Image: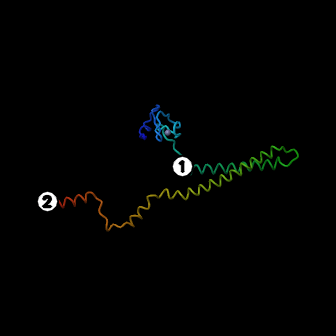
Amino acid sequence: MKYSHKLFQCGNRFNDMFCPRCGKADQVQETYCRQCGLYLPDFSKPIKRESPPEEHLKANTVLSVMTIIASFTLSFFLFLVLGFRSFTHPLIYVTAGILLAMGGWHIQTLIRTLMLKQQWKRRAPLNEIQSAPTGKLLDQANFTDAIPASVTEHTTRHLAKTTPTD
Ligand SMILES: [Zn+2]
């Protein structure tokens, strides 16, 4: 059983909504369908604008670099100032170790972000110039055998044939 999208988009807040996938009635917006588990968003609410992926990548890069610098500086400081002394508490080594691990983890996050960035850069020009090939296609097209698509032209020819010319 299929229900039209209109039922879903009229913005009613009552439980007379149907699941667009399985058609189960009596649904509540912003919950999951009780029959098939499909998420049912509230269409009466404005859709939140997603920030472009470039911004995400930039923010991730900055965050990773800052975390790497901070964690390595701190662990280095801990080892240098407090480590390898007779009074050194084991917790200092643990903390420094955790900081090093955090820095290491963020190095791989940074590498992955940079790789994603490159991928995005390679993809971006393709996204922008999708209408460009039209000019090329026009050059390649063969118009010699083409039948004019103009309705006016066709009608004029048709009329010219049938209309008596006296
Ligand atoms: Zn459902």
Describe residue 104's horizontal placement relative to residue 79 as left or right.
left
Residue 148: x, y in percent? 29, 62
**Disc 2 residue lies near ligand 1 with CB under 8 A:** no
Outermost residue, top direction?
14
Describe residue 143's horizontal placement relative to residue 160 as left or right.
right
Outermost residue, left direction?
166
Describe residue 38's horizontal placement relative to residue 67 as left or right.
left
Disc 2 residue type (three-letter):
Pro
Mark number displayed over residue 164: 2
Figure disc tally? 2
Disc 1 residue type (three-letter):
Pro
| Image quarter hosting the C terminus | bottom left
In the rendered structure, which disc, 1 or 2, sits on the residue that comes first in sequence? Answer: 1
| SS of the residue under disc 1 | loop
Residue 100: x, y in percent? 74, 50
Residue on which the image places disc 1: 52
Task: From this view, report whether residue 35 is shown above or below residue 114.
Answer: above
Q: How crowded is mark 1: few (under 14 residues within 10 Å), some or many (20 or more)?
A: few
Residue 20: x, y in percent? 46, 40
Residue 165: x, y in percent? 13, 61
Q: Which residue is drawn at 71% across and 48% down?
A: 102
Describe residue 49's horizontal placement relative to residue 135 as left or right.
right
Q: Which of 63 and 142 is in front in this view?
A: 142
Outermost residue, right direction?
86
| Image quarter hosting the N terminus | top left
Task: From this view, report whether residue 84 is shown above or below residue 161.
Answer: above
| SS of the residue under disc 2 | loop
Outermost residue, front direction?
1
Measured in 3D between alpha carbons, the distance from the residue under mark 1 to the one under mark 2, in whole angstroms, is 65 Å
Q: Which of 148 and 81 is in front in this view?
A: 148
Mark number displayed over residue 36: none
Q: Residue at x 41, y 61 (%)?
A: 134
